[in-house]
Image: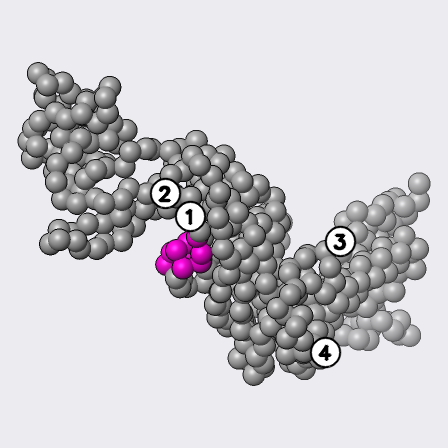
Amino acid sequence: MADGPSFCQRVVQVVFEYDTPRIVHIKNKKVGLINRLIQLGIIGYIIGWVFVYKKGYQDFGDIVSSVSTKLKGVAYPNRTDIGDLNRVWDIAGLVVPPQQRDGFFIMTNMIITPDQHQTTCAEAPWIGGNVSCTDTDTSNCPAGHVELTGNGMFTGKCANFSSEVQTCEIQGWCPVEQQDNPPSPAVLEDAKEFTILLKNTISFPLFNFTKRNILDDYDPGYLKNCRFNNSDPVDKYCPIIRLDTMVKEANQNFTALAEQGGIIGISITWDCNLDYSSSYCLPKYSFTRLDKADSKVSPGYNFRYARYYRENGTDYRTLIKAYGIRFDVVVSGKAGKFNIIPLTMNIGSGLALLGVATILCDIVVLYLLKKRFFYQEKKYMMVDDDDDLRLFAKPTKPGKLSGKYEQLEEDQTVNHHRNEQNYGS
């Protein structure tokens, strides 16, 4: 048995081989239909998705934004069950803090503890730790102990929180809060009629483009009287929005939200096609609740703050536990404008993608069809540099080439018989 080429010879053969595409026209309706369908699908993707939907002919710029807010409104609870809280409230007392970055807070409910000063009093029984005691048992009240969730430092004594409840005496700001839950319904439920003016200025530095959500063509009279209405083709761009409208757009109930508080997100979206007039670059407002509405633990949104004053040489404060709605403003958007560079890049990518049709059809023809062996024989051809082109011409006289021609003719006959075996039946 003759030895085959050595390993080194095989390596040399592989290194110094060259593959070139061979064009074979296959007259097969099934393969032709597959090829055209794939090409149509790729062309549809390029035109429909890349250029029409994704605007692949444009360059896109990021947004830079600033937001400021201005609230207006006055509320009067007109209730007899809330004591000193039954008074006229305006924005100066309800918006805490007066200015907040990219948002604002409006107080809708509260627990007020007035005239606190540094002295001793009974701790609140709901602070979390065990602060119950009696005149004869103060084991839960070690002197000098500070309960982290409490209101002061234990004195080691027991005091009357109410006529029925005794708790550990503390040193701190007294008296402590006398209730744990806010009033129901909310003290300032009428705050739903308050309005907010959103002033949003955006720019796209890449295109040197700047615009406000208060449009330049607004009539001053219209701006004073308009109210945002998402279903109206004109008023949906009005920057003055009722609080109740925002809560309803977020699919929430203002009465329930005002009692425990919550967080509402205001989204302003700018999607601008700068190939058109700037008058078509308009904001879109949407609203959603950001905190979990049905939370069982620590629901809603609240915090405490104090107002200090001095009287007769003694420091006093009014402690306010504020419940309310925090509105967070989020601005997003993009702008696009025609640019030849992304256009040519996407066209080039699309033309390259058309080559996928040829690859897929080759897979079908060479590996899936019944006549795949026949097509493989037509597709691939091995050319050896040692073969002479004269092999393809039959010699007229016996000579050195006659043997090689006979061998070639014999190989062709074998291949012919093989094809008949494969496809004859």
Name the residue rendered at 64%, 61% in the picture: 227
Answer left or right for 326 relative to 208: left
Q: Which amino acid does label 2 sit on?
A: Asp
The residue tagged 4 is 276
Q: Which element type, helix, strand or loop, lies under badge 3?
A: helix
Disc 2 versus disc 3: nearer the observer: 2
**In which quadrant will I find the C terminus?**
top right
**Magenta-highlighted residues:** 89-97
The answer to which of marks 1 and 3 sits earlier in the sequence is 1
Residue 90 lies within the magenta run: yes
- Residue 262, percent from left and from top: 46, 45
- Residue 266, percent from left and from top: 54, 56
Residue 358 visible, this orientation: no
Answer left or right for 72 relative to 403: left
- Inter-mark Cα distance, 2 to 4: 58 Å
Q: What residue type is labelled 4?
A: Tyr
Q: Do tag 1 and tag 2 residues touch (Cβ < 8 Å)?
A: yes
The residue tagged 2 is 84
Q: Is residue 303 above or below residue 406?
A: above
Residue 136, quarter of the rendered image: top left
Q: In this view, does 294 lie above or below 340?
A: above
The residue tagged 1 is 87
Q: What residue type is labelled 1?
A: Arg
The answer to which of marks 2 and 3 sits earlier in the sequence is 2
Q: Which element type, helix, strand or loop, lies under badge 2?
A: helix
